[in-house]
Image (tube, rainbow, N blue to C red):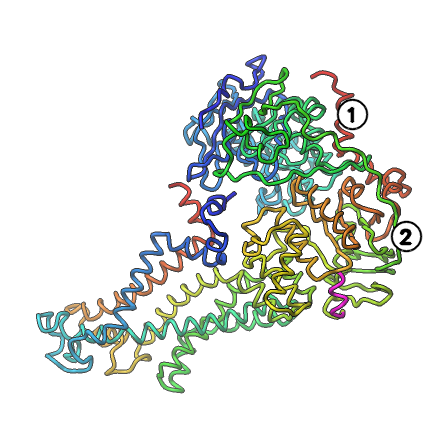
């Protein structure tokens, strides 16, 4: 493959001295020659946040790590330049020797990891960890100055600067506080650029919003550039000035956030934006057919062509270059600007079904030792409906879902399935009852046995509930795989040979195999990419219609609720705060807790943010 | 991402998949240290199994004066009683090989079972099992073995059993450690919600996931068993004369270590090589498990 003239068209910087980081023609290769990332060029100005979005496998983390001179798991950086501005002038990170590189990491380019709990040393007090970050680059800093800087850094990220707090260990802090420490450690040296790798995944919406505010503020205050890697488009709209969309190891669209969101020019970007559920209306979710190609199986022409509705022979012929389509707006597409996916149309909200009660809970109580998780939960589920159970982390929604399938023991009056009482634990329930209620786990990476083929995974369920000949068995597997959109060939595969979305489909197939009436879905899309989430949600909606399934959908994502649910149950500290029609609850919440929840969700909502940011920032 | 390469290789999915265990094994086989380990172990095994048929003399036949120098008739010289050293070495390997493997196997079966049960039990029983193992661990192996051997006589099956049992607590600890992480996974919870019998959950869901670390542990246990059994035999509690055994040969010939070192060094070297070979295999396997090998192969 010939190198495209990417250097020439690298987004130009108006004022050279304003530039914090410049990347030209970055290329990262696998040992066998295929590239993970190639032809990536961008720049970050001082005080500017560049949002890097892409789905799993798009190479976004590879690009982020390359800024620190790292390549993961056998990959090597084989081409390109990364110029970072230091007080001593511009330095090419990729040309630096080991000692220079060590000095540059942290001092010129700092990193905020995804999981602060894993990145902070559990055996060190946070003051010592912050001091360590300082001393690594400024070994002669006097003691008093260290203390001052630490106190300033703590104030900047909004944490108490008291001695008692600084003496804490990481496990004595909440997830949000830990991530603030991670951010403080990155900003304390005042680097030119900060690389943030999905720093808010795993935090709830409220905490996420606060953390993003801190990052935005610090970047403005100290004129530090930032590369924010995320799969969450709404995070980008809240935080970033410019956005770079990656697909299959290439940057496919780069531009100002407002422009890209208002007028996405690449078909992939258009599809991606339409895969995000909205809170204020029920939009038709778009899922993208097919999969991104693996690094050494990519097509000759545009990598997105096999999944693109607009692709023609010219698209498939030769690699496409990133070109400046409008001032500051770069697109890697021959059909740039054509509408591949129209703006998602608004659908009417689902309404409450008039159907008999299938499952009822009365005064359900669960406690783990002295901790009461559910304090008397009472509700009814109607046959064939989708009831969403929402709440923040700690509200008891996951416990509730596990109680229903009998994984957690409850006290109180209890549960009834079609007016028959259900025993607290699954093993005390009848075979027929176990068969009727099935559960789908949050993480498809944890819920499938990695040492079993899909056939063996499904076999466990089949052998528990049915007996049949080998042909019957296989036919049942094929039927259920077809329903979830998988092929017969998947039966022989192991979980690590499947993508996240495929694994979740296998989990759904496993649940469907017993021919259940109720499907309990516990945050089933939270570990998945947006376009995959759209596909799974569409699938669940279809199954509800076609099989008359009753779905209990546990989630923290209210926009998703609007898309799939008939009714919503809002859980607050183990008590039902509000239950009702989906449109009613989201548009006219009554309970103060629900109002707060909707308000937080609105702050994180993509459409809402895009709207307000258009109004708030007429020009950069 | 990591298996992108493997995804590209196999034409049919069945050909390339196999279980994850076979994948690990295949990866381990590609490592130099595993290959060397297998080579050494095979040589020793061959020596122990085929040796008796190659030996020029009966192991207990007196053929010359004691401690004769190596010569054309007896390549390695003679031992303390004037028997051919080479023949005794060729005959003396079988015992230590089968005994150490058998002892390690007993240790693995007992310890593995205890460890799995302890990890899966969610009440006092698991705790009780592990504390019991701690008590076992506190007993000095050699003293315990000597006690039983002096009560019941130095019989091979007894020594195998005792060395095996003495390995149990360590195996139980390792198994419990790796299994404790697995039993909390969602797929185990799922099987429980289906009311799958507990033995089946242990066997189907948990055991395959701890197989690779257990295989590594098996290698380590064989090495310890070799050391233990050889030590017992050097002390005279293993194979009884006039039968040949590497440990016993060391014991018999140690009196002339200074002038006729071969009588001690040759059997000692063979025991050491056997242990080294098994250890290299175990290490190759364990580096694949912990991911060290992956990094190294990536740098090529």
Q: Residue at x 82, y 60 (%)?
A: A365
Residue identifier under label 2: A354
* Residue B38 vertical placement versus A130 (above, below): below
Left or right placement of residue A33 versus residue A527 in this view: left
Image quadrant of residue A291? Answer: top right
- Callout 2: few (<14), some (14-19), or many (20+) C-alpha neighbours within 10 Å? few
Considering the whole magenta stretch, tell me its main secondary structure.
Answer: helix
Q: Position of residue A571 (x, y in %)?
A: 82, 49
Numbered disc 2: what chain? A
- Callout 1: few (<14), some (14-19), or many (20+) C-alpha neighbours within 10 Å? some
* Residue A123 vertical placement versus A413 (above, below): above
Residue A445 visible to an observer of this rendering: yes
Single out the residue that lies furthest toward the bottom. B152
Of the numbered discs 2 and 1, the one sitting upstream in the chain is 2
Residue A136 visible to an observer of this rendering: no
Determine which of the numbered discs, if any, sits on residue A174 in the image.
none
Q: Residue at x 47, y 34 (%)?
A: A35
Q: Position of residue A593 (x, y in %)?
A: 85, 43
Numbered disc 1: what chain? A
Total marks in image: 2
Image quadrant of residue B76? Answer: bottom left
Magenta span of residues: A430-437
Residue identifier under label 1: A612
Left or right placement of residue B198 versus residue A592 in this view: left
Assess whether residue A435 is covered by the magenta stretch: yes
Q: Position of residue A601 (x, y in %)?
A: 78, 37
């Amino acid at each position: 493959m010939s190198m495209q003239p990417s250097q020439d068209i690298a987004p130009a910087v108006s004022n050279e001295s304003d530039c914090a980081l410049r990347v030209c023609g970055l290329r990262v290769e696998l040992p066998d020659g295929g590239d993970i990332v190639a032809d990536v060029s961008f720049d970050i100005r001082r005080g500017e946040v560049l949002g890097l979005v892409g789905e799993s496998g798009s190479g976004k983390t590879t690009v982020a790590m390359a800024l620190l001179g790292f390549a993961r798991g056998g990959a090597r950086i084989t081409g390109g330049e990364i110029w970072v501005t230091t007080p001593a002038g511009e330095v090419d990170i990729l040309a630096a020797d080991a000692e220079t590189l060590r000095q540059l990491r942290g001092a010129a380019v700092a990193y905020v990891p995804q999981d602060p709990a894993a990145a902070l040393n559990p055996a060190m007090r946070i003051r010592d960890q912050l001091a360590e970050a300082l001393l690594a680059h400024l070994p002669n800093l006097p003691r008093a100055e260290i203390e001052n800087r630490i106190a300033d850094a703590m104030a900047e990220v909004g944490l108490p600067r008291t001695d008692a707090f600084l003496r804490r260990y990481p496990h004595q802090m909440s997830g949000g506080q830990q991530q603030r420490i991670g951010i403080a450690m990155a900003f304390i040296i005042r680097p030119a650029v900060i690389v943030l790798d999905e720093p808010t995944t795993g935090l709830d919406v409220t905490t996420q919003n606060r953390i993003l505010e801190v990052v935005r503020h610090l970047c403005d205050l100290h004129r530090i550039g930032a590369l924010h890697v995320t799969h969450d488009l709404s995070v980008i709209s809240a935080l970033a000035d410019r956005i770079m969309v990656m697909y299959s190891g290439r940057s496919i669209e780069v531009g100002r956030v407002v422009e890209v969101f208002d007028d996405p020019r690449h078909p992939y970007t258009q599809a991606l934006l339409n895969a995000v559920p909205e809170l204020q209306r029920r939009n038709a979710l778009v899922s993208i057919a097919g999969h991104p190609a693996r690094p050494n199986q990519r097509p000759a022409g545009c990598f997105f062509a096999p999944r693109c509705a607009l692709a023609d022979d010219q698209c498939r012929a030769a690699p496409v270059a990133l070109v400046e389509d409008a001032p500051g707006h770069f697109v890697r597409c021959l059909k740039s600007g054509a509408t591949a996916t129209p703006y998602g149309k608004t659908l009417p909200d689902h309404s409450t079904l008039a159907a008999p009660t299938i499952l009822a809970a009365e005064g359900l109580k669960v406690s783990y030792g002295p901790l009461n998780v559910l304090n008397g939960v009472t509700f009814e589920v109607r046959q064939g409906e989708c009831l969403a159970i929402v709440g923040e982390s700690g509200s008891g929604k996951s416990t509730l879902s596990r109680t229903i399938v009998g994984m957690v023991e409850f006290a109180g009056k209890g549960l009834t399935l079609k007016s028959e009482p259900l025993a607290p634990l699954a093993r005390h329930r009848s075979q027929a009852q176990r068969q009727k209620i099935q559960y789908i786990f949050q993480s498809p990476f944890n819920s499938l046995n990695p040492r079993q083929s899909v056939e063996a995974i499904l076999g466990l369920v089949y052998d528990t509930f049915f007996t049949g000949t080998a042909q019957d068995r296989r036919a049942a597997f094929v039927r259920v795989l077809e329903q979830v959109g998988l092929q017969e060939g998947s039966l022989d595969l192991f979980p690590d040979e499947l993508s996240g979305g495929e694994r979740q489909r296998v989990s759904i197939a496993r649940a469907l195999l017993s021919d259940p009436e109720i499907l309990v879905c516990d945050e089933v899309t939270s570990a998945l990419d947006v376009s995959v989430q759209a596909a799974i949600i569409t699938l669940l909606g279809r199954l509800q219609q076609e099989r008359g399934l009753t779905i209990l959908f546990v989630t923290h994502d209210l926009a998703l609720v609007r898309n799939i649910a008939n009714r919503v149950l809002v859980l607050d500290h183990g008590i039902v705060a509000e239950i009702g029609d989906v449109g009613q609850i989201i548009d006219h919440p009554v309970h103060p807790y629900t109002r707060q929840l909707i308000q937080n969700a609105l702050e994180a909502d993509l459409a809402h943010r895009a709207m307000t940011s258009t109004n708030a920032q007429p020009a950069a | 991402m990591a298996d992108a390469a493997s995804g590209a290789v196999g034409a049919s999915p069945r050909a390339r998949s196999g279980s994850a265990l076979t994948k690990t094994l295949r990866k381990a086989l590609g490592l130099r240290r595993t290959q060397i380990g297998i080579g050494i172990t095979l040589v020793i095994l061959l020596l122990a199994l085929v040796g008796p048929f190659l030996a020029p003399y009966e192991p207990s036949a007196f053929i010359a004066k004691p401690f004769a120098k190596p010569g054309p008739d007896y390549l390695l010289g003679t031992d303390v009683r004037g028997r051919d050293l080479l023949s005794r070495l060729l005959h003396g390997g079988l015992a230590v090989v089968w005994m150490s493997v058998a002892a390690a196997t007993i240790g693995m079966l007992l310890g593995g079972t205890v460890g799995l049960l302890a990890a899966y039990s969610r009440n006092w029983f698991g705790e009780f099992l592990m504390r019991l193992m701690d008590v076992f661990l506190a007993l000095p192996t050699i003293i315990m073995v000597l006690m039983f051997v002096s009560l019941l006589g130095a019989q091979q099956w007894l020594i195998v059993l005792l060395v095996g049992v003495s390995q149990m607590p360590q195996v139980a600890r390792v198994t419990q450690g790796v299994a404790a992480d697995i039993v909390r996974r969602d797929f185990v919870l799922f099987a429980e919600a289906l009311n799958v019998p507990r033995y089946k959950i242990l066997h189907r869901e948990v055991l395959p996931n701890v197989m690779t670390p257990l295989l590594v542990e098996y290698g380590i246990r064989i090495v310890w068993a070799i050391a233990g059994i050889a030590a017992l035999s050097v002390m005279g509690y293993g194979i009884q004369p006039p039968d040949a055994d590497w440990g016993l040969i060391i014991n018999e010939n140690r009196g002339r270590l200074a002038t006729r070192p071969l009588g001690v060094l040759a059997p000692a070297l063979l025991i050491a090589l056997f242990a080294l070979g098994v250890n290299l295999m175990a290490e190759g396997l364990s580096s694949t498990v912990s991911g060290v090998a992956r990094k190294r192969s990536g740098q090529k």
